[in-house]
Image (cartoon, rainbow, N blue to C red):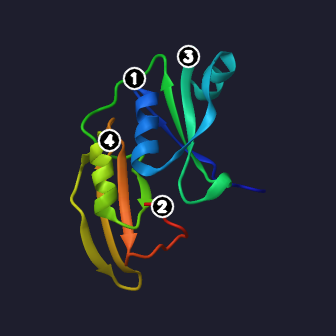
Amino acid sequence: MNIRYVHTNIVAKDWQCIADFYENALNCTRLEPSLDIGGKWLADGTGVTDAKLTGIHLRFPGYGDTAPTLEIFQYVEQLDRPEPSAANRPGFGHLAFEVSDVEAVRSQILAHGGKDLGVPVSNKLEGHGTITFTYMTDPEGNVIELQSWDGVSRYGAVDA
C-alpha cells in the first residue's frame, strides 16, 4: 500500500484573504486555477448537505514543485467556530514553518494581519539542539508556529 501526505485544509471565512496572508507573510505559492465546486458528489463525500465551496491550493515553501499544499476552502454555508484560538484546544493544532529568523517572519505576519499568541523564546532541548519558536495566528485565528533550530535547518532549505 502506498501512502503520501498531500495537503492540509483550512476552512476560512474569507478564502482570498487567508490565501493572500499565507502568500505574503509565509511565502506560499498560489496554484491556479482556483476551485468553485459543489454538487451531490461533494455533499456525499464531505457529509455536508448541499455542499458548495470556493478556494485554492497554496504550495508550501522550501520543497519545490512536489510540495504538500495548504488547501483553503470557503463553504457557501458554514458553521461558526468557537473563539478565541488557543494552542491547547483539541483538534487541528497548528501549521509549523521552519524559518531562518523567527523575529523577522513574526514581523511579516503581524504586518499582514496575524497576531501573537505567545512570545519568541529560545530553549535548549537535550539531544535536539536549541529551538527558538513562537505561536501566532493568521487573520482568522488559525494557529501558526514559527521555529528555528540553532539558526540551521533540520529539514532542508529554509525560505525566510
Pointer 4: residues within 10 angstroms few (<14), some, or many (20+)? some
Residue labelled with disc 2: 159
Q: Nearer the viewer, residue 158 or 82?
A: 158
Mark 4 or mark 1, earlier in chain: 1
C-alpha span from label 2 to label 1: 35 Å
Residue labelled with disc 1: 79
C-alpha span from label 4 to label 2: 17 Å
Amino acid at pointer 1: Leu
Q: Position of residue 70 (x, y in %)?
A: 53, 44
Q: Is residue 88 visible?
A: no
C-alpha span from label 2 to label 3: 40 Å
Residue labelled with disc 3: 49
- The C terminus, quarter of image: bottom left
C-alpha span from label 4 to label 1: 25 Å
Pointer 1: residues within 10 angstroms few (<14), some, or many (20+)? few
SS under mark 2: loop
C-alpha span from label 3 to label 4: 34 Å
Residue labelled with disc 4: 112
Left or right side of 2 for 64? left
Residue drawn 36% across the image and 42% down it: 142
- The N terminus, quarter of image: bottom right
Q: Given this view, does label 2 or label 1 mark the residue nearer the observer? A: 2
Residue drawn 63% across the image and 53% down it: 5
SS under mark 4: loop
Amino acid at pointer 2: Asp
Q: Given this view, does label 2 or label 3 mark the residue nearer the observer? A: 2
Mark 3 or mark 4, earlier in chain: 3
Amino acid at pointer 3: Thr
Q: Given this view, does label 4 or label 1 mark the residue nearer the observer? A: 4
